[in-house]
Image (cartoon, rainbow, N blue to C red):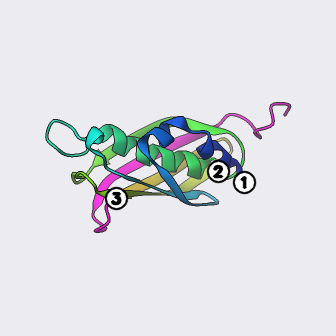
Amino acid sequence: MSPAEEMFAADASAAMLGIELLEVGAGRAIVAMTVRDDMLNGHGTCHGGPIFSLADTAFAVACNSHGPITVAAAASVDFLNPAAFDDRLTATATEKFRRGRTGLYDVIVSNDAGEPIAHFRGRSHTVARSTDAST
């Protein structure tokens, strides 16, 4: 199991939201979740929090795909379209820049119809060279 897959397997928040890891590679990741009734806001659409968390999870997996422990330094999201109950949302993270301890990642969240739901941009910071505490 890769460091990114190990990190995802230990992510209790992602598990609570029902997020599934579909794909991981160098600087990229795809995760998905289905919108449940407990994720709906007062307007009957998916609350922004679970959408942000889905995108943030894809970002986390992608920026940890290189091995060193990496965390978010900053993130922003633009909500483009509403997501409805039972929508299957997919978040695709792509590394745009990585140098030294800093990385920049774009994540597109879309529904099964391919409509964009959100655009997330995350900046990462590498805090350790490996998951081994002795290094």
Taking the magenta stretch, the answer to whether it contains residue 119 is yes
Residue 45 location, x and y as percent? 20, 46
Q: The N terminus appears in which quarter of the rendering?
A: bottom right
Name the residue rendered at 80%, 31% in the picture: 133
Residue 17 as seen in the image, left or right of residue 72: left
40, 114: nearer the viewer: 40
Q: Are marks 3 and 2 in contact (CB under 8 Å)?
A: no
Residue located beneath label 2 in the image:
5
Residue extending farthest to the front is 37
Residue 124 location, x and y as percent? 56, 41
Say what amino acid the circle numbered 3 marks.
Answer: Arg
Res 102 seen here = no
Relative to 135, residue 6 above or below: below
Q: Which residues are magenta?
A: 111-135
Tell me the crowding category of disc 1: few under 14, some 14 to 19, or many 20 or more residues within 10 angstroms, Cα based: few
Residue located beneath label 1 in the image:
1
